[in-house]
């Protein structure tokens, strides 16, 4: 039975509502995700799209969106604990929920018109529609300002051309929030719908990471986008970067869930597995691994919780979010690697979740801003000198 580590009683910092939400999502993950996720990952098949509808029923999609638009109206710590439990199941299911919440629902709520909010948000919150977010391009990842995707004003509609790559939910999405440059070179957001002529979403295959995730491209070949689908609230890169900050915040919590699952697995195995007539857990080097893993998880839990408090207060800065995303994902990846060693050869099998988490985290440490870019964001914040300009 799963026994999540809480060495510093972080649970005491959560409200009863937070715990109720966490327990509800944890129960769903244990009933629906954990029994099947290894099989889907082994076969390189995306998890069932029905899971997205079920997450909508749980209130796990856009939980911070107001109730009038179909959201749960929860705070950011609630969003964090949801992401923790989902990523304990698999990074693929957390990624799907994170994209839906932070990269699709958030920009429509924050930058969209009232008509757009009413049209899209309730269906996205319920999981009736699946969303994708188009920013990264084949040749432009960390430098989105150099994007090549463009749209032109054709009088009664916009004409969109270009492509986006490494897009979670792309093969199954009903709508996509796409960032493209207008004729003046300004970055704008457009809502593109499945069925618009010239809009295709080929699946990305042969992945060693996020194998249970639906990943693909967004390709636009003279796509006619109605003018009412332009997000009116903002021009420039600030819009997509604000979306990424929301997603990175969720990742900072989610990665802790993957690490906790690896630690719990390693600890139980070390107590049960015997070598030289003694439990593996009795040996000094294994205790060192477990103690160091638990220390790092505890630090990451506190970092995420404090960031959640700041976010609820409207005080969390992009640099603080970058620090938490970078630290917590690195911690989770190191935890997976150390935990795998505790299990020895058994750690690479699908009988245990550690190797799957490890492979997934190799993507998580890169997407929503690479590990190195987040370090430079912190460096720019503390010195006032951007190293990437």
Image: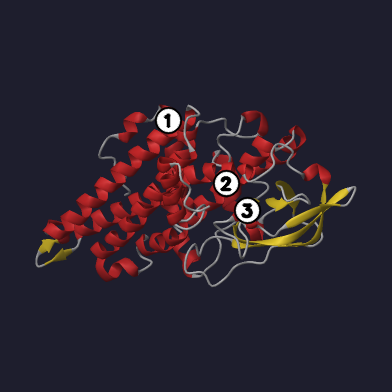
Disc 1 versus disc 3: distance between alpha carbons? 31 Å
Q: What distance separates the C-alpha of mark 1 from that of mark 2?
A: 28 Å
Q: Are marks 1 and 2 in contact (CB under 8 Å)?
A: no
Give residue 309's mark: 1
Residue where numbered disc 3 is placed: 145
Q: Secondary structure at mark 1?
A: helix
Can you see residue 24? Answer: no
Which-is-in-front pick, marks 1 and 2?
Answer: 1
- Residue nearest the observer in this picture, 307 or 254: 307
Along the viewing direction, whichever of 67 and 373 lies nearer the viewer: 373
* Earlier-in-chain disc, 3 versus 2: 2
Residue 102 percent coordinates (x, y)? 57, 43
Callout 3–callout 2 Cβ contact below 8 Å: no
Q: Is residue 51 left or right of residue 265?
A: right
Along the polypeptide, which appears first: circle 1 or circle 2? 2
> What is the x, y in percent for residue 348?
34, 69
Query: In the image, which disc is placed on residue 54?
Result: 2
Q: Position of residue 18 (x, y in %)?
A: 43, 32
Q: Which mark is residue 338?
A: none
Q: On the picture, is 206 further left or further right than 2?
A: right
């Amino acid at each position: 039975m799963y026994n999540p580590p809480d060495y510093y009683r972080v649970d005491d910092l959560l409200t009863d509502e937070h715990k109720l939400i966490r327990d509800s999502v944890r129960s769903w993950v244990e009933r629906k995700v954990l029994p099947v996720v290894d099989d889907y990952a082994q076969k390189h098949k995306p998890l069932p799209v029905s899971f997205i509808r079920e997450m909508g029923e749980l209130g796990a999609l856009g939980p911070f969106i107001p109730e009038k638009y179909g959201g749960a109206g929860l705070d950011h710590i609630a969003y964090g604990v949801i992401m923790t439990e989902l990523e304990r199941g698999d990074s693929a299911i957390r990624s799907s929920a994170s994209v839906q919440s932070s990269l699709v629902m958030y920009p429509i709520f924050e930058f969209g018109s009232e008509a757009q909010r009413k049209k899209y948000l309730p269906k996205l919150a319920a999981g009736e529609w699946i969303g994708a977010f188009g920013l990264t391009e084949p040749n432009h990842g960390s430098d989105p300002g150099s994007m090549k995707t463009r749209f032109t004003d054709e009088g009664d509609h916009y004409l969109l051309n270009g492509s986006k790559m490494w897009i979670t939910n792309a093969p199954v999405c009903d709508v996509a929030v796409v960032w493209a440059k207008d004729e003046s070179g300004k970055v704008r957001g457009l809502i593109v719908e499945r069925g618009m002529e010239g809009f295709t979403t080929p699946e990305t295959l042969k992945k060693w990471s996020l194998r249970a995730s639906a990943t693909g491209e967004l390709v636009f070949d003279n796509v006619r986008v109605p003018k009412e689908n332009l997000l009116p609230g903002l021009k420039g890169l600030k819009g997509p970067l604000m979306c990424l900050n929301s997603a990175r915040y969720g990742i900072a919590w989610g990665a802790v869930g993957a690490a906790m699952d690896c630690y719990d697995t390693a600890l139980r195995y070390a107590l049960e597995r015997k070598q030289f007539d003694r439990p593996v857990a009795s040996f000094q080097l294994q205790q060192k691994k477990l103690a160091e893993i638990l220390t790092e998880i505890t630090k990451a839990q506190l970092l995420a919780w404090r960031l959640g408090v700041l976010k609820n207060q409207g005080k969390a800065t992009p640099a603080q979010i970058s620090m938490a995303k970078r630290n917590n994902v690195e911690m989770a990846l190191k935890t997976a690697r150390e935990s795998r060693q505790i299990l020895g050869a058994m750690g690479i099998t699908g009988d245990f979740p550690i190797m799957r988490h490890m492979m997934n985290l190799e993507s998580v440490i890169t997407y929503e801003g690479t590990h190195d870019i987040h370090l430079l964001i912190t460096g720019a914040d503390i010195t006032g000198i951007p190293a990437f300009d």
